[in-house]
Amino acid sequence: MTSYLTFLLVFMIIAALAAVTMEDLLSAVISLGALGFAASIVFLMLKAPDVEIVKRIVEVLVLVLLVRATIRRDVETVSGTRDTFGMIAAAVLILLMSVFVIKVVGSLPEVGDSAMARNADAPSNHYLDKSLEETGAGNAVTGVLLDYRGYDTLGEATVLFAAVLGAVTLLRKRARRLPAGRAES
Amino acid sequence: MSEIVRTVTRWIFAFIATYGVYLVAYGHLTPGGGFAGGVMLASGYVLLVLSRGAKEAEKSLGLRPAKALDSVGALLFLAIAVLGLVLGQGFFENFIQKSTPGEPLEILNAGIIPLCNIAIALKVMTSLFVVFVVMASVRFAGSGEELEYTSEEE
């Protein structure tokens, strides 16, 4: 399974590089979509079907939205040399992050082993043992999301609500007419 | 779009909607849940808007009812949480499961979890649909065809 994972991860890196370097905007969006679908397959292989379903469906919707936004638009192209300082800063940051990530990955358990096995009184163990009995939900993920951690889900819904409110307010077509006597600033 | 696209999308919409409703209704038993099912249903409506044009798609889900349903979903979710405080001991307490536990692994089970799933699905479906319509119909300078969605009339 590890070889399949490696293949998918390499594919994702290539797709990401392609998305950045592609000149055509539509092709870049499509490579971004390929990256997302590869990521959803990775989630499925790592036995997280809930995440996989959400990832795949959101990917489709975002792809449609991006294609709709990029197609038939007059895109401005910029030319000239790249910002040297920005590139060096980005390279240093990526190197630094890679060092940290490699250190952390070394201490992770093997793929398929449970991370909370080392800590006997981790709440995750309680959720796995008792969620069917206490919440009645056969899917432990939903049991955690909507029963034990319902408060977090409420926050998530609030974030979505605020985002929609912002989009509707900022992208509206009609403005309210100012009352007479008040000049537009 | 052409007649072929319109007909095929009408059929495909039935499958998308069925899968979306399944994801919501069985969210407490199989992978899925309110968020995934809501996004699925939203993408179905987006398909309708793209294939038929906004004017005709408005008959199935307009922008105004979508905005209203968005708020209804959010308030429903909050109401379920507050009911736990009123009828049980705490915010978000699963008071139905505590008082009348159902058969394990049955669809009518798990107390408030299916109800929360339905509320979240309603919320996510309508809010993503509103975001799509608003972002797709925004006027960019120098762009050609527009996706007009007219139900924003006061």
Image (spheres, rainbow, N blue to C red):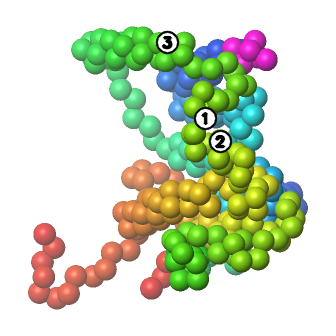
User: What is the spatial separation of the Cα atoms under label 2 and label 1, in whole angstroms?
Assistant: 7 Å
Mark 3: amino acid: Ile
Q: Which residue is mark 2?
A: A125
The label number, if any, that marks residue A120 in the structure image? 1
* Start-end of magenta stretch: A1-6
User: What is the spatial separation of the Cα atoms under label 2 and label 3, in whole angstroms?
Assistant: 27 Å
Mark 1: amino acid: Ala
Instruction: Report the chain holding disc 1.
Output: A
| Mark toward the viewer: 2 or 3 | 2
Task: Identify the element where label 3 is drawn.
Answer: helix
Query: Which numbered disc flags the more N-terminal residue, 3 or 1?
Result: 3
Q: Nearer the viewer, residue A4 or B127?
A: A4
Q: Nearer the viewer, residue A146 or A6?
A: A146
Q: Look at the image and tell me in which quarter the N terminus of chain B lies.
A: bottom right
Whether marks 2 and 1 lie on the same chain:
yes
- Prevailing secondary structure class for the magenta stretch in the rendered image: helix
The label number, if any, that marks residue A102 in the structure image? 3
Q: Which residue sits at x=11%, y=87%? A: A181
Mark 2: amino acid: Asn
